Amino acid sequence: MGLLSAFGFQKEKKFAAELVKQLAKDISADQMQLKRRSMSVNKITRLLEKTYLQVKKYQEENSMGFLRRTVFANTFRWELRSQNYPEDFCAMVTEGLIVELMKKTEGKK
């Protein structure tokens, strides 16, 4: 049993994996590797906004402190990597996810 499993972060890990699975249906890793230049920026933006909207809803429904947000964001990035998305895409999408997660936290202050 790993340290993170002991803290019960399975729900966050599962949701992060589900988000990546849904994103992969909308924008495959192959498309991002081979056809990125010909893809519409607006389409990619809309699909990422859809993903971030799901994150916002999840954040509102679940209490996620710093550690849970960290596990969630790291799992999300590793899931993207495991799907063979380009590293710069993984970094950009994960950064957007972190910004979305931080919005809720900043609003509480």
Image (cartoon, grey):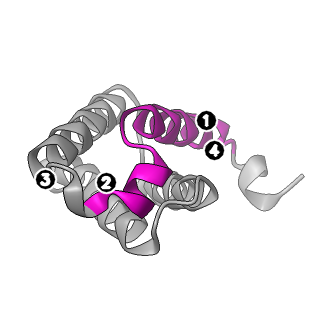
Q: In this view, does 18 lie above or below 6?
A: above
Which residue is depicted at the point 78% across and 49% down? 6
Nearer mark to the viewer, of 3 and 1 = 3
**To which residue does mark 3 refer?**
41
**Secondary structure under badge 2?**
helix
Residue 9: image tag: 4
Q: What residue type is labelled 4?
A: Phe
Marks 1 and 4, the one that precedes in the sequence: 4
Label 1 CA crowd tier, 10 Å (few <14, some 14–19, many 20+): few
Nearer mark to the viewer, of 3 and 4 = 3
Which span is picked out in magenta? 8-36
Task: State the separation of the CA atoms marked 2 and 1.
Answer: 16 Å
Label 3 CA crowd tier, 10 Å (few <14, some 14–19, many 20+): few
What is the total number of numbered labels drawn onto the structure image? 4
Marks 3 and 4, the one that precedes in the sequence: 4
**Secondary structure under badge 1?**
helix
Nearer mark to the viewer, of 2 and 4 = 2
Marks 2 and 1, the one that precedes in the sequence: 1
Marks 3 and 1, the one that precedes in the sequence: 1
**To which residue does mark 2 refer?**
97
Nearer mark to the viewer, of 3 and 2 = 3
**To which residue does mark 1 refer?**
14
Q: Which amino acid does label 3 sit on?
A: Val
Q: What residue type is labelled 2?
A: Leu
Which residue is depicted at the point 45% across and 44% down? 28
**Secondary structure under badge 4?**
loop
